[in-house]
Amino acid sequence: MATLIAGEEDEQAVAEVKNNVQELSKLADEKEGEAGLETEQQREQEQERQQEQEQEEEKEQEIEIEKFVDLMHCRDDEEPESWPLASLAAEEKAKQFYEAQRFKLWKRRPLDNLPPEARISTNWFNPQWSGFRRVKNVFVQMEWVPDLAKALRSKEPLLLDPVEEMEMHKKLRTAWDLLMRGEGIEMPSPEVTITRSETQVVPGKKVEKLPPPPGEIGAERLMELLAASFDWDPALRDPAAALAFLGRKRDEKLSYEDMVQLLLDGRFRTRDEHRHFVMLSLAEAETLRRVLHARLQELKFGPVVGGVHSA
């Protein structure tokens, strides 16, 4: 290499060439970096564009599904039907209301575990409709007493089907165990004390009847039980009154079976006979509200419904 460089001019030329090569190399590296950055940005933009396109396609698909579902639901005979206001004076005249126990959607089972005082207006949902229906998402509940003279406190005990009775005993056994601990009595393990005495078969489920657990509770634990069971009404928390319902004296103790009888007693189930709770459509509720406002000058609602004192 040294033999090719003859003089100072050659050395300067070589140095200039090396300098040019270095500068070109730097420029190439910078361009390559810029190209890589642009490529990365393009890749990110392409991914964002694909994600937006997928989201739009999903929205369009959801809209199509909703349109298809709407087409599946029948809307025939859904126009509201008027009914005479005087029909509120008697249960047998109010044909526009039916027991909520009969409510069911098409090809579904009815809600037969609802209380008998729950009613539904045919304008909210008519049981005679067929096909898939959209249930109205707006309703107003009306408390309805056709004749206040017949609205008496019910004394009938709470009726449970076998499945509900089994669930009740499961919870009451836990409560009884806690009450026994309060009395200073340690209850044995359920696996030791409880044996299967009888098995009843109901559709789709087995109901096991188990013997009642041992032990008794006094007035103090009875008050705790009543306070936990009927916390909405202080009048139902009196142990003396509860013992009187069972025909017991103040100092007598109660067994597990006595506790079950007490909790099912109709005098502790605060419901009235001939008092109903009706699910109305919004249009029906608005109409009844206008009627009530129009009769504000009258002290009783009775004249509106044919002379009977209704509420």
Image: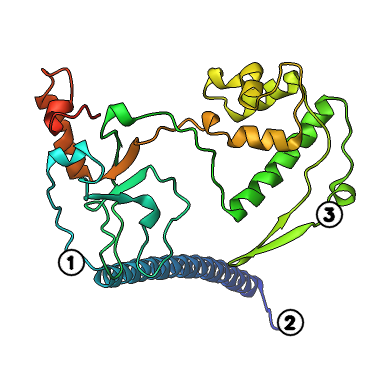
Classify residue 247 by image quadrant.
top right
Q: What secondary structure is found at the residue carrying circle 3?
A: loop
For discs 2 and 3, the disc positioned in front in the rendered view? 3
Q: What secondary structure is found at the residue carrying circle 2?
A: loop
The x, y position of residue 240, in whole percent, is 65, 17
Q: Within 10 angstroms of label 3, few (less than 14), some, or many (20 or more) residues?
A: few
The correct choice, above or below, for 41 with respect to 147 in the image is below
- Residue position marked by numbered label 2 in the rendering: 1
| Sequence-wise first label, 1 or 2 | 2
The x, y position of residue 221, in whole percent, is 74, 23
Instruction: Name the kind of residue labelled 2 in the image.
Output: Met
User: Residue at (18%, 66%) from the top-left corner?
Assistant: 76
Whole-angstrom CA distance, mark 1 to mark 2, is 101 Å
Marking on residue 195: 3
Coloration of the structure image: rainbow
Whole-angstrom CA distance, mark 2 to mark 3, is 107 Å
For discs 3 and 1, the disc positioned in front in the rendered view? 3
